Image (cartoon, helix red, strand yellow):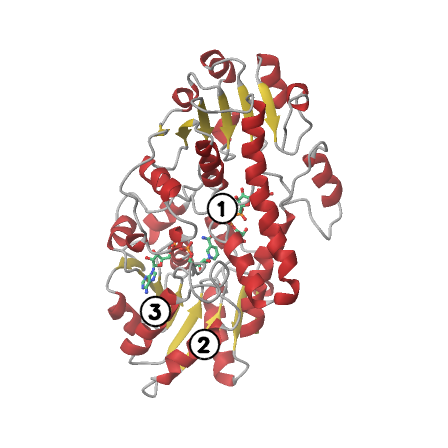
Amino acid sequence: MVKICCIGAGYVGGPTMAVIALKCPSVEVVVVDISVPRINAWNSDHLPIYEPGLDEVVQQCRGRNLFFSTNVEKHVSEADIIFVSVNTPTKTRGLGAGKAADLTYWESAARMIADVAKSDKIVVEKSTVPVKTAEAIEKILTHNSKGINYQILSNPEFLAEGTAIQDLLNPDRVLIGGRETPDGQKAIKALKDVYAQWVPEERIITTNLWSAELSKLAANAFLAQRISSATGADVSEVSYAIGKDSRIGPKFLNASVGFGGSCFQKDILNLVYICDEVACYWKQVIKVNDYQKSRFVNRVVSSMFNTVSGKKIAIFGFAFKKDTGDTRETPAIDVCKGLLGDKASLSIYDPQVTEDQIQRDLSMGKFDWDHPIHLQPVSPTSIKQVSVVWDPYQAARDAHGLCILTEWDEFKRLDYEKIYESMRKPAFVFDGRNVVDAEKLRELGFIVYSIGKPLDPWLKDMPALA
Ligand SMILES: NC(=O)C1=CN([C@@H]2O[C@H](COP(=O)(O)OP(=O)(O)OC[C@H]3O[C@@H](n4cnc5c(N)ncnc54)[C@H](O)[C@@H]3O)[C@@H](O)[C@H]2O)C=CC1
Ligand SMILES: O=C(O)[C@H]1O[C@H](OP(=O)(O)OP(=O)(O)OC[C@H]2O[C@@H](n3ccc(=O)[nH]c3=O)[C@H](O)[C@@H]2O)[C@H](O)[C@@H](O)[C@@H]1O
């Protein structure tokens, strides 16, 4: 029986291994992590991450050929194939601070593998890493190899949160990079055999290590730079017109309050760090995204008579996209911080994000989120002007304005008449995700700003617009 061990039971390690276990009943899959609460949660009825369809897959396989454990060394030493899916944060100090990836966790995982291995191993790079990481890891592993043969593969993950299970069950492509030696090719085949249990052969692409690593960063950078916005023009019309070109495709052109999530910014920064010549272009993508968030805050403040001081603002949605509870780099953090900076008081509702998480996010420093949870700095005080509620109607009661920051489907179905009645007048809606029917809301009496859509007459006439 092939034994797989995955180091890192996070958003990638957990769902990816669950699907491998589901599709390969003859493979034993153990997911290990240094975080005891995370592993306990994977072994409970309340999984540590929210992802549609994940509960069902885990229930089917857990205890059969899928296991979660904190006994990292034991399972690493017994495995034939070791996936490494640990955090790869952006460095906050030292050489390359603010850009380069911090490979502390990757390196410590590699050293641990070298320490405990007693048999040949295929080590699979699942984390998103800077180009050439595989080569560096190879050096660590082989430096102290005790005659053990290590083969390094790069197998970057392309799943998106919120659709992870679908993406894993039916991927556009699986990319496997390896050495061009006979042993390297043998290792590629071993991993290919795993995916081939459910992924059609033509969708499994094999390359060299460098190509696989670079493809991942370039794919994320390419997707991120497509998310843009225009004032005055209707973005859905423009994206339809551009998207009609089948070489481009209509997806991934939705304007929003900015892209978020754990990867886009960090992976672009990574690319900026390695390729100086084109760095300006990619830096600009991040700058435009930052601008998009501050522009949204400016819009809110300037529309509400240039001050939100002491005003209650309801925030609908805090996760970085719908169908996830993940808040890493969510645009909501910057928007909320911006509004708090203007002394607003916020009432936040998100169906999947807890008060504790929101308070942590609003008090944490940039990039601190991308470390294992027990190593993250925790602020002792929570922010007084922020309240978190489990009911959108409660969030909106007596509010002067309402900001929609995540595109949860339920926000489309709310009773906006009831919300309007309970709010202070004039009642403003700032839709950062193009979720609501702006015309209908205007008929109810709201003043509505929808990102990437023509402006409300009220807003056009407001002075000092950003
Ligand atoms: N979240 C996403 O949608 C995607 C993420 N990625 C990449 O995958 C990697 C992992 O990302 P996530 O799963 O989102 O992160 P995560 O933070 O959810 O999970 C990483 C896990 O690794 C554990 N860990 C860290 N060092 C360890 C060690 N030495 N031994 C054992 N466990 C250790 C942490 O405790 C944590 O639970 C990153 O490089 C990311 O860029 C790639 C594709 C998609
Ligand atoms: O490397 C990664 O981590 C992953 O990064 C993204 O996945 P993810 O960040 O989970 O989610 P996306 O659907 O890409 O959304 C990212 C951000 O862009 C925003 N977005 C997306 C699409 C769009 O049209 N407009 C838009 O504003 C989303 O709301 C979200 O804030 C990529 O889509 C995945 O292929 C990749 O594996």
Q: Residue at x 27, y 48 (%)?
A: 41
Eye-nearest disc, 3 or 1 = 3
Asked whether the residues under the numbered discs 1 and 2 touch, taking CB atoms below 8 Å apart as contact, a structural biologist would say no
Residue at image x 68%, y 35%?
A: 236
Towards the viewer: 438 or 369 = 369
Which of label 1 and label 2 is nearer to you? 2
Residue type, mark 2 in image: Ala
The quadrant of the rendering that contains the C terminus is top right
Tell me, yes or no, if residue 208 can be seen here. Answer: no
Name the secondary structure under disc 2.
Answer: helix
Q: Position of residue 365 (x, y in %)?
A: 40, 48
Q: Residue at x 37, y 77 (%)?
A: 121
Give the label on residue 163, or none: 1
Badge 1 density bin: few <14, some 14–19, many ≥20, Cα 10 Å: some
**Inter-mark Cα distance, 1 to 2:** 32 Å
Q: CA distance from mark 3 to mark 1?
A: 28 Å
Q: Is mark 1 within 8 Å of ligand 2?
A: yes
